[in-house]
Image (cartoon, rainbow, N blue to C red):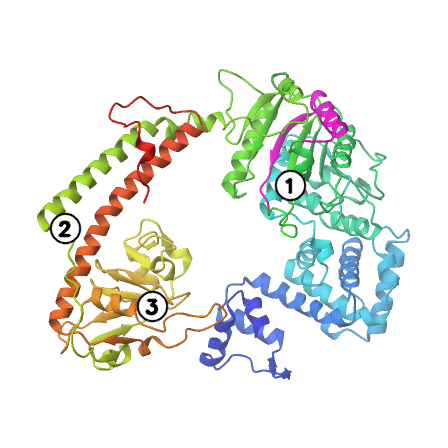
Amino acid sequence: MSEIAAFARVKRPVVSTWRRRHRDFPAAVSQNSGRPLFDGAQVADWLITSGLGNAALAELRSELALFGIVALRDRFTPWQLVETLGSLLCLRRLDGRPLTDGTNGSPDEAEADGTLWSAVLRRAGRIDAEDDFVLRELSSLDATAAPLVRLAEDLVEAAYDEHGAYEWLLAARSRLGLDSLAADAAAPELRRLLTQLTDLRFRLEHGEALTLADPHARAGDLLAALLDDTEDRDRVTVLAADPDERLARITRRRLLLAGVDELDLDVQTGSDLEEHLADPDLVVTQLPYRPGETRSVLTALEEVERVADLLRPGCTALVLGPADALVDALKDTEASRLRSALLRANLVESVIALPGGVLPFRPGYRPALWTLTRGPVREAEGKVLLADISADELTADVRMRLAEDVLLWRAEGFRKLDGHDPRYGRVVPVADLDRAFGGPLTPPAPPAATIWSDEVKERPALIAEAEARLERATAEARAYESGHGPYLGGVLRREGRLPRRTTLGKLIAGRAVTRLPGHRVDDRHLTVDGHHAVIGPEEITGGRPVGARRIDRLVLATEYDRVALTEPGDVIYTLTPRLALHVDHDGFSVVAFPARVLRVAPDADRPLTPRVLAALLGAARGTGRSPSAVRPARRVEDYQLPELTPDEVRRFDAVLADIEHRERLLRAQADALAETRSLTVAGLADGTLTLADVPARRADVRDLPTG
């Protein structure tokens, strides 16, 4: 059932709900250690018919084939699965017809495995006689691999072609147990950034025939990402190399299936890229990963130098490597000399410090990116664009802006009057970097576009507005205190017997309190400017401001016809991840599950107020939870409360209301001070603000107590 949840892209409890509510849900066909097992085809058909789950039709079909492949791991090694299925898909592309042709039936009705496999081997020997793509891998297996032929056909049927089927298979390499093959994979946004920086689509649209190269291809992820961005693959020649022969053959098959003609493809086994077929126009590569204990900065820079040697005038290279060699300050004299030589050679176009985590399997690895261009435009000569996004998340917006910075720098260079100010870096003369021999290649100051942005220019006005709000909040607090006097709770020690205890469950049974459920709200329907606030556990526990998530009333009426809005004074509570309560004084909100509502009945025999109920529940004993516990220690109905008299409830509510109002006034002052401090510090830090000598500021202000 957990696999069905992954299959349908839902949480595990949803599958249990489907089994309980839908009588036509497929029955279990067997059991394994007490766990029910289901027929995958039946589950896929049920999901398609019912329309439930979050997986698209094509995903269901491909996932069904992938589950069948994963199930064969007890018969084949992960390497055999990837290599054999890739070879079968490549054979199908080279031959131009299904693998089961000539077996007198569909893939599920094929003849004996031996006959099918013999036919596959004959076709492989005829089509790939020189063993460039498939013959070696297929010849190493016997007829026990015949089920893989049928699974390859299932993948093609789901993906519509061999290329899509192979990409699906390689995307699931970790599920197959090939973590070593996935260890160097880049995050999707990083692959998109590299694709944008090559500007491959624009070059091909303007009639250029290009040669792509990757001297450290590994499984061909970067080259495949570039080819996926264009349809003009008939005008692309690809050169690649990798020391591992297995990886070189995987890359060769991958590029062939991606649409590169066999005659325009040269994937070599080795550490050096030999340019027999053509001279590269674009080089995109990721330097081999080495652990920090054995990593050599000099070796990384020498590999960058070898990439630079591949470039002809007007050609571009993108090199992804370790930040300690490409960006950080260098202590080794020889490495510093080599990096300075590369900078002086007028090759380095930009240096970009990337955020951690863009190589998901190596979260502690700090990557950086160099873009190289031999023969840059005249305006860019002798200068380098330094950018640093290491503290940012590589989102689509950051990626688009950074790519625009680099591409405009490549096309136009530096122009004082009407040039483009980079959003993430600074243009720095190479002479300045050379004088700071071995110094870090990071921007010397915030980007000019940031310093002179409208937000920065408006800082003095924003600070003045915050100061005015502070004055108003202070005056309002003084007026409130002058009208109500200083805070006096009137708290006394109780004499005599303690009040009797009751439970929330008894209050609910006696109709003094009504409990109402929360509602499941789809995140796609949430906005920041809807008509109704959506309040869930994040808002109640303080993780998100109340009102930050909203929903439009038309969407609410159309998609959630059974949702009931809160009433003013409803108490919203959650037990996940801990007990937290919120009094919704305004009402008309939507409560998001697992949060729920407690509504106080004003006509009860011993009525409570929402504030009093929330305060007593928040102070109830036994509401905590052990860090390792899955559920709270007790149900919310078992929480005990004292039975206060009506006068005590009235006075208690008045005290709580007074405290809330005073807190609101103090919070307004604190918020205004916090905004003033933040804007002032930001302006002084980036050099856009200075301070005047204010006579009222006492010289001994630093000696004031901080408590």
- Residue neighbourhood size for the residue with mark 1, other residues' Cα within 10 Å, grouped as few (<14), some (14–19), many (≥20): many
- The local secondary structure at tag 1 comes to strand
Which one is in front, 215 or 506?
Answer: 506
Which circle, 3 or 2, is nearer the viewer?
2
The CA distance from mark 3 to mark 2 is 40 Å
Q: CA distance from mark 2 to mark 1?
A: 59 Å
Seen in the picture, residue 400 relative to 138 is either above or below; the reply is above
Q: Quadrant of the C terminus?
A: top left
What residue lies at 60% left-to-right and 43% top-to-bottom?
190
**379 in relation to 181, above or below:** above
Q: Is residue 322 visible to the viewer in this orientation of the structure?
A: yes
Magenta segment, which residues? Answer: 330-356
- Reply yes or no: does residue 678 show up in magenta: no
Answer whether residue 333 is magenta in the image. yes
Q: CA distance from mark 3 to mark 1?
A: 45 Å
Provide the residue designation for mark 3.
518
Q: Which mark is residue 119?
A: none
Give the residue pinned by disc 2: 486
Q: Earlier in the sequence, mark 3 or mark 1?
A: 1
Q: Nearer the viewer, residue 171 or 279?
A: 171
Tell me which residue sits at (52%, 27%) in the image. Answer: 422
- Which amino acid does the dot numbered 3 rest on? Gly
- Looking at the picture, which amino acid does disc 2 mark? Pro
Camera-side mark, 2 or 1: 2
Q: Residue at x 59, y 62 (%)?
A: 59
Q: Secondary structure at mark 2?
A: loop
Provide the secondary structure element on which disc 3 rests. Answer: loop
Which numbered dot is residue 367? 1
Asked if the residue at tag 2 contacts the one at tag 3, i.e. Cβ–Cβ closer than 8 Å, the answer is no
